[in-house]
Amino acid sequence: MAGYILRRLLQAIPVFIGTTFLIYFMVFALPGDPIIALFGDKTPNPAVVAQLRAQYHLDQPFVVQYLIYMGGIFRGDFGISFSGQPVTEILARTFPVTLRLAVIALLIETIAGILVGMVAGLRKGKLFDGTTLAISLILISLPVFVIAFVAQFVFGVQLGWARTTVGEGAPTIDLILPAIVLASISFAQIVRLTRSSVIETSSLDFVRTAYSKGLGRGRIIPVHILRNSLIPVVTYLATDFGVLLVGATVTEGIFNVPGVGNTLYQAIIRGEGPTVVSFVTVMVLIYLLVNLAVDLLYGLLDPRIRYVK
């Protein structure tokens, strides 16, 4: 097992380095001067501009800038934003909000998705099944910002059931509507995945044997069908949690959630390269760690995976 863990860790290192290099290159290869942009319409003092360039190492060649940045990453230093605040402090303030939003979204999509998908699979070809497939297809087809604006208008403006924007301090009650929007596409995927898995499992020999033994549906469905149908769903949920953490930028921006995604959105608008690079790097780290945890879980559940060459 130790060898398997070591191999997965070694495989994650080049992925992390390559990803951060591409991110750094794409952000700082954008046209325009981020230092000049800080002053807006004002004419900056050349001495101040030179000082800021030196402070953010923008006077160095690109490769040197990247190596300095990576050196700081390995020391736990994600740099300084253009506002002069350490990026680690911004992360410490915003990441707990995004984590709460992702956890709520994961709970919503897990509970609702599995229940709806299970019922649809057990009632294959019926009205509920057809309606579920149609709704899930619509949710998958719609961009998340469309779902967000519709949810804001219907539940916030027309019905008044929720606030259209998240309040100061991001109370949990205000995060429910953004979490529903964030979970909507994954909910549709889980419904379809659970439905197809339930249909496939229901036709297997051991299920027919259970029926032939006289076992009731109250035992066959949860123990024999649902339990074996959840294996691919759990796999999807494990990776989707990382997606929820790193993919909340649009949802947080629309609902003004003071989380990582909204802060990243504002940094992109202001052209704050160091903040954008550092936040995206943290998101890459989170995604890699979640995927590494899933790979290790596979190795624990199925020892054969550990010995695949």
Image: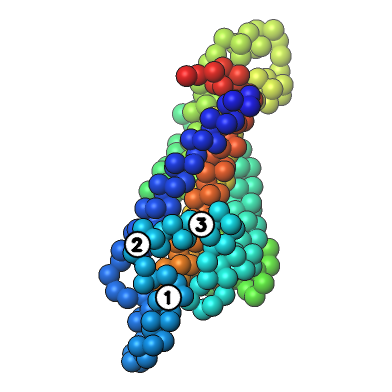
Q: Tell me which numbered mark, 1 or 2, is placed earlier along the sequence.
A: 1
First reached walking from the N terminus: tag 1 or tag 3:
1
**Relative vertical location of residue 256 with respect to residue 47 in this rendering, above or below:** above
Residue 1, disc: none
Residue 71: numbered disc: 3
Residue bearing the label numbered 2? 62
Expressed as whole percent of the image width and height from the top left, the position of residue 183 reads: 54, 51
Q: Which residue is mark 1?
A: 54
Crowding near the residue tagged with mark 3, few <14, some 14–19, many ≥20 C-alpha atoms within 10 Å: few
Is residue 146 at least partly visible in the picture? no
Judged from the image, the secondary structure of the residue bearing numbered disc 2 is helix
The residue shown at (61%, 61%) is 95
- In depth, the one of 230 and 37 nearer the eye is 37
Which residue is more in the foreground, 36 or 64? 64
Task: Specify few, some or many for label 2: CA neighbours under 10 Å numbering under 14, 14-19, or 20 or more.
Answer: some
Under circle 3, the secondary element is helix
Would you say the residues marked 1 and 3 are in contact, meaning their CB atoms lie under 8 Å apart? no
Give x and y (percent) for residue 298.
Answer: 58, 27
For the point 51% across and 24% down, the residue is: 199
What amino acid does circle 1 point to?
Ala
